[in-house]
Each structure stands twice: as structure tokens, then as C-alpha cells.
Amino acid sequence: MPDPLLVVDGLSVAYDGAVQALHDVSLRVDAGSVVAVLGSNGAGKTTLLRAISRSLGSVGGVVTAGTVHFEGQELNNRDTSWVVRAGLVQVPEGRRIFRDLTVEENLNAGGYTVRDKGARRDARDRAFELFPILAERRDQRAGLLSGGQQQMLAMGRALMSSPKLLLLDEPSLGLAPKLVEQIGDIIQQIHSMGTSVLLIEQNAAMGLRVADRAYVLEVGSVTAEGTSAQLSATDEIRDRYLGVGSTSPTRTIHEDEPVDVPVHLQTSSPARAQELRVEDLTVKFGGITALSGVSFTVAAGTVHALIGPNGAGKSTCINVLGGAYRATSGTVHYGTTEISSLRAHRIADLGIARTFQNISLSLDASVEDNLLVGRHRVMRTGTVAQALRLPNARREERKERENVRRIAVLLGIEELLETEVHTLSYGDRKRVEMGRALAAEPTLLLLDEPVAGMTHGESQVMADAIRAVQQELGLSILLVEHDMPFVMGLAERITVLDFGKHIAEGSPTDVQQDPEVLRAYLGTAAA
């Protein structure tokens, strides 16, 4: 057999000298192949890519045993820049693009190490050929792209250096089914152009479709490996990762069904949920219309979902409701208060809290301290008293830390309270962000892709937690999410957007059967 392109042999990794993330992991990637690494949330998949790309040091990780060889060269003593120049490039999870740069400027940044101008131009042309939407929006600021378009940009930027091996970390994260299929096709095109791929994926169906060989990573160790066909045929993989086994059916949570919770939350405010009315909302960015005359109502104390394919305008709508974007026209009322002209902190004062599509946490702070930030809205002692550590401020802080611990128990992250956020998996960070929003005691909760990066089982646990909170506190929830079993089992009413326009609304059953919705999500042939 020819020498492999990448060999990982007996690799072990720890964070901050104590937390063991990988133990004795071995795998290989042959030249001209696509290899998938599957695993649940927190299995160590991202840590594996960081160890290969030599980016562990920036997050407090260190290789404690084992080796990584790329084209016969040991990487343990190499830095990140050497690895990139050698032809090994990583696309990190979470769509980490330069939001304030244009699409073309982001691509040019990816070709920084390529000295030949002609080679850079050719690579940019190939990126535009793979991702035509990026060519259409080459002069648009990257932060205004949809989540799917940002993922394409991150992949296109990585391809600018014409890598020999592309490391892809969760490229289907938070994408609609039609776009997930498109990303899978693009990975196959990248492979056909001569680039090998090591793919980290929780979407096992997509990963096994495009890969030649796959490894399963659980709690930092390889528990299974084989060809994609072999792994797809095993009951364990079909049940746990493909959602088609007999032991993990999707459970629908009914509106009036009580949910057992390990702890009850306490509130310090008598405020109650109010009706949210979005009326004829239009948002434009330059010449691009992100929302066009969108209207819907979220009844007080209900769970309402806002769904649609990537680029439909869902996150733009959430950003207007939370005060991050200004509407071009139209209004938004929460109760009797018009909020479409208010700043974000004034909207938060009304009891509206949110999570973000691209996670926004203090990475170097602990989970507990991140949750405590959410309590500042309800704390009575002022900033000066807290800074001076006055007795009343210390007493209140002790009380509030107990409150955030109750939230952590509810979300299943109590064991992570003292852990710094940068060491957490993507799915655990989503739980922390949810907890921070709940800590603010909202009456309206805006959730932007709350279960992105979670497996089927993990998303079901999150659904139980959301339903429990909604029932116990009586708050309203507006939910944006691509995980349809999660949405259909949780939402009482659903509004569907496509290309910035309202195309359908109704109960989950009505929406599931609407031909326009099926076409938007799955494409005409599938519908």
C-alpha cells in the first residue's frame, strides 16, 4: 500500500494539565480519500483536529502522548504556520469568518501564504465556481451572509491555499437538509479536484455518504472503525447516529404534558409574558432584501417556531427583535411597547433575552461566571458595590451563584460550572448560552439554533429542558432551528420563511404537509 497522507498514532491530549480529552487515538488518511470521524457532543472530535493542525496551544491543550505525521513529517514540534504551508488546512466549527470584511477580502485572507498572484487568482476563481452565491456577493460584508453562506465562505477561504488535506469541522452544523446535501456534494467535488478530506461530523448520514472510511470517537477514544458501508450497516451506528434504530424513537412533547425536572427555578420579578407582534417587517442591506413584508404573532406563553432554508431571513428577524439590526420598515410590538426602534439593552430591560447563531460567550471565563452575567439584569447592587466587594454585594453574589447552579442542573451542565468555556465542545457551549439567557429571567426567549452541534438524543434532552422552563415560568419562546424533529415536537405554531418572505404558517402538522414548505426545504424533486 502507498504511504498514507496523515497518520495519527496513539494520540492523547489534555487541557490545562488535567482534563483528558483524547486517549490513545489512532487513525490514517490515505492520499485521495475522504475519511469521516463521527461522535457525540464532547467526544473529542474538535480536539483531534486541533492536535493535527497544531492549534491546541491557543486553547490550553497539550499533546501528552502519541504522534501525528503528515507526508512522513512529524508535526509535534511544528507550528501552525508550517502546517498550513505544508498543505494541511483546517476549517473550524462555528463559521469563523471575518465578519467585517467582504466576501472577497475573506477569500484573499485565505490565500495569504500563496506568493504567486496567478495561483491566488485561480484559487479564487475555483472557490467562486464551487460556491456561485459567493461570487454574487463578493462585495458584501461577510457578517450579513446567512449561516449556510458563511459556512461556504469558510470552506472557500481554506481552499485558497490549495491544500493537500482539508480538515472540516462540522460543515453541516445548523444547515437545512437541502443545503446539507449540497455541502456533501461540494465535499465530493473538492475530493475530485485532488484534495483529501478529514471530515468531523455529527450528521452521520452525510458523513457516511461522502466518506470512504470512518471512525467513531466516544469519550476521547476510538470505539469503531471501518468502511462507510460497514459502519452504516451496524445496529449501534444506525440507532445512535442515523436515528433509524428501534431503541430511540423521536418523542413528541405535547403542550399540556408535564415534564419532570431535577430542580425548580425561582424568579425575582412578577413580570409575565406578553404578545409579540411583527407587522410588515422589511430589512434591507444595501441592495439585498433580507426580509420583505413579514408578519406573524407569538401568543403570550407559547412556543412559536420560525423556520426556513438557509438564507430565508430567520436570523435577520431574530436580530431585529433583539435590537442588533434596525428594520427598514414595519414595526415590532411586545405587549403595548414598540421595540423596533429601541436599542438592545432597552429591549433586554423589557424581559427579552436571546441566544445567538454564532455563539457569543466569554471563552476564558468559567461556565459559572458566564451564567452569572445573565443575572446582572436582576441584581440589585450596583457596579461600584460589586467592584469594591462590599458586604451586601458579596451576599447577593453568593445568592446569585446558587441561582445559576439551579439553571446548570436543569440544563445538565452542573459538572462543568468551574470549567473554562474555551475547553468545551460546541454543543456544551450552546447549553451555556441557553443558561445565560435563562439567568436573565426573561418573559420572551429568542432561541437561534439552540441544538446546533447536538446529536438526536442530546437535542431531545434540550427539548425537555425548554418545555420544562416554558411550563414552569410561563414565558414565550420564539425558536429558530433546522432540526425538524426538535421543532415539530416542541412548537405549538410555526411560521415559515423563504427568500425573506412569509410562505406558510400553522400547526406543526399543517406545515409538514404544505407543498411550498417541502419544496423550500427539500427541493422540487424530493417534495
Image (cartoon, rainbow, N blue to C red):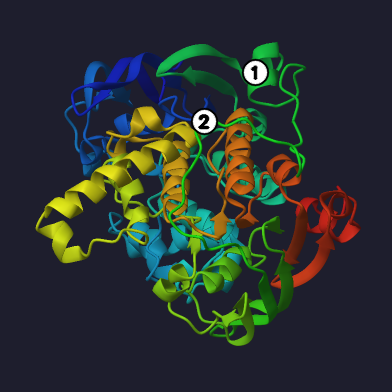
- Give, as a three-letter code, the residue at label 2: Gly
Q: Is residue 404 left or right of residue 503?
A: left
Image quadrant of residue 24?
A: top left
Q: Which residue is painted at 30% across and 30% down in the image?
A: 51
The image position of residue 419, as x and y in percent, is 28, 34
Q: Is residue 2 left or right of residue 478?
A: left
Q: Is residue 292 above or below residue 486?
A: below
Of residues 22 and 121, the one nearer the viewer is 22
* Crowding near the residue tagged with mark 1, few <14, some 14–19, many ≥20 C-alpha atoms within 10 Å: many
Q: Is residue 408 above or below residue 372?
A: above
Q: Which residue is painted at 55% across and 47% down in the image?
A: 450
Of residues 333 and 281, the one nearer the viewer is 333
Q: Which residue is painted at 42% across and 56% down in the image?
A: 440
* Crowding near the residue tagged with mark 2, few <14, some 14–19, many ≥20 C-alpha atoms within 10 Å: some
Q: Is residue 210 above or below residue 381?
A: above
Q: Residue furthest left?
A: 388
Q: According to the image, label 2 marks what residue? A: 32
Q: According to the image, label 1 marks what residue? A: 237
Of residues 398 and 363, the one nearer the viewer is 398
Residue 102 shows in the view? no
